[in-house]
Image (cartoon, rainbow, N blue to C red):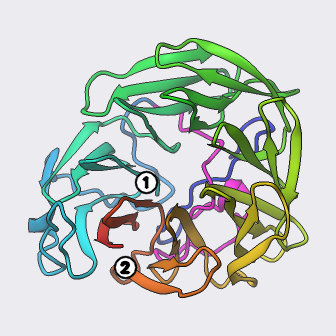
Amino acid sequence: MRGPRVALLTILLLACGARSELEGLDVDDATSASDASTDAPSANVDSSTTDVADTSVPDVRDATAPDVTDAASIDAGIDAPISPTCAAQGTTVLATATYGSSDIEQDDTYVYFHDDNGIARVPKGGGKVEILTHTKVSNPILLRASTLDWVKWDPQSSSIITIPKSGGALSTLVSEMQPGFAGLTSGPGDDVFLFGASVENNTLLEVTDTGVVTNKGLIPPNATDLQISDGVLYFGVEYGGVTALDAQGMFHFLGKGPGDIPVPGNLRFDAQTVYFMNYDYLTSGRWLMSVPKSGGPVATLASHPNGEDQYGDLRVSGSVYFTEGQAGLVWRMDPDGSNKAVVGTSQPKDGALGLAVDDLCVYWRGTFHVYAAPR
């Protein structure tokens, strides 16, 4: 599935027998538990507000599992739960999960994730898993200062749903009676930017934490991702490259990656550079790329030009970190692509998808586990 004209990239599930490729483009790939990844946020959101199992894949949830789970007791033999200072010697399992989104977020204390059981969090140092809501959420969650937000979309309407990040009642931040909201990204302060609602045009909207909406102008209908760095909006263009929208409303094309039908996504930043993933719809090739924020030469940092593996997620925190889906590996490299080293490894056939990084650790999502390792 994909939203109306907005081509944000679809979440991949590392699930045996079922898989959807980025943005709904690559639907013919095989679907083993270690053969999928996420290249960018999905434009499609599950319209259900109840906890309904995905019938397209085997229901593997443990019906006896309590709402609060001791990850260490389930995954004994992997590693003991890490301390808050990330003292683990290697990969550590923080939580056991079911099928669901590969999305993962972190704040100073917790790692947040969601699956068929709902939205949950686990302490960074290991311990009890708290289920914050049993509502099944298929779209990526956006972690803000005090809330978790996501888009609920169906053919008739679209809404931003929010919940306190400690758990509690769901509420609707803003809604409209046409199917247009497609993705969230953090704006200045604690505001939210999202793609707006129109079949004819895509409107960029800013939404405050009280639901006040400001129209920020139009963006191309084939935009694939939206991210903000230093007040400048950057986005990918389906079958194109990366573009910046400055404060004066001027568009600046920065560059594009290889491939006959390229799809850029998962834009990340440091002070001078935009990093992104490039997917070729024709060959299933994948590349990790960089380009100066001001435009210039586009560099290839890592590649699978024939689609032999997929890059699940990309983060920049001094070094560049990325996940390699089929291999179940978390890599670290210098910003120029040199000095690549594996810093984490998933359990066999679990894969490596969504990624988060703090000052001490990397955290990532496999099909059935949430992991941590020293960075």
* Residue at image coords 39%, 81%: 343
Quadrant of the image occupied by residue 202? top right
- Front-lying residue, 262 or 342: 342
Residue underneath mark 2 = 344
Q: Is residue 124 above or below residue 50?
A: below
Q: Amino acid at mark 2?
A: Gly
Front tag of 1 and 2: 2
- Front-lying residue, 296 or 146: 296
Give the percent coordinates (x, y) of residue 180: 71, 27
Give the percent coordinates (x, y) of residue 264: 75, 59
Residue underneath mark 1 = 100
Q: Are marks 1 and 2 in contact (CB under 8 Å)?
A: no
Give the percent coordinates (x, y) of residue 131: 24, 42
Q: Is residue 97 above or below residue 290?
A: above
Q: Earlier in the sequence, mark 1 or mark 2?
A: 1
Q: Amino acid at mark 1?
A: Gly
Looking at the image, residue 326 sits to the left or right of residue 77; the answer is: right
Quadrant of the image occupied by residue 76? bottom left
Magenta-colored stretch includes residue 38: yes
Kindly report the secondary structure that dominates the magenta region of the rendered protein: loop
Whole-angstrom CA distance, mark 1 to mark 2, is 21 Å
Query: Magenta segment, which residues?
Result: 19-48
Looking at the image, residue 125 sits to the left or right of residue 369; the answer is: left
Residue 147, label in figure = none
- Pointer 1: residues within 10 angstroms few (<14), some, or many (20+)? many
* Residue at image coords 77%, 31%: 247
